[in-house]
Image (cartoon, grey):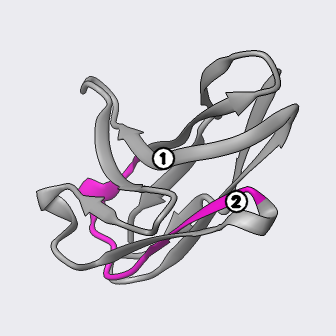
Amino acid sequence: QVQLVETGGGLVQPGGSLRLSCAASGSILSLGTMGWYRQAPGKQRELVAVITTSGVTTYADFVEGRFTISRDSAKNTVYLQMNSLKPEDTAVYSCNAKGLTYDRLFVSWGQGTQVTVSA
């Protein structure tokens, strides 16, 4: 079983910054692509950013250069640095990871962390 635990959410003023972390643990043989998604009230979950094992990144259009995804493979952790936050960035942010345990492929989700951007 693989667990993902997100930390770093909270309340921030418009224009502020937050750094989210997501640590994977469990019987992990290898981690593949990891990513961040978000879901605002009344909306569907949407991709924010993903990063491959080789460090190739993909961002949603709405990021507009404000967010940076990174990973520390030694710590099985993915990060999302969010700058210049806007009220419309308010959502529950969840991380996702694909990989291998010792006996199967897995796709896991974290429980989510609330990000609220408000004055």
Crowd around label 2: few <14 · some 14–19 · many ≥20 (10 Å): many
Q: CA distance from mark 2 to mark 1?
A: 11 Å
Image position of 102 with respect to 91: above or below: above
Residue type for callout 1: Thr
Residue beneath the point at 33% across and 65% down = 57
In this view of the protein, which residue sits in the foreground, 111 or 87? 111
> Mark number for residue 33?
1
Element type where label 2 sits in the image:
strand
Location of the C terminus (image quadrant)? bottom left
> Mark number for residue 77?
2
Residue beneath the point at 34% across and 30% down = 41
Q: Can you give x and y, in whole percent of width and height, for residue 37 in the image?
A: 40, 42
Q: Can you give x and y, in whole percent of width and height, for residue 59 in the image?
A: 25, 60
Residue beneath the point at 33% across and 73% down = 85
In this view of the protein, which residue sits in the foreground, 53 or 10? 53
Left or right of 24 on screen, residue 36: left
Which comes before the other along the chain, label 2 or label 1? 1
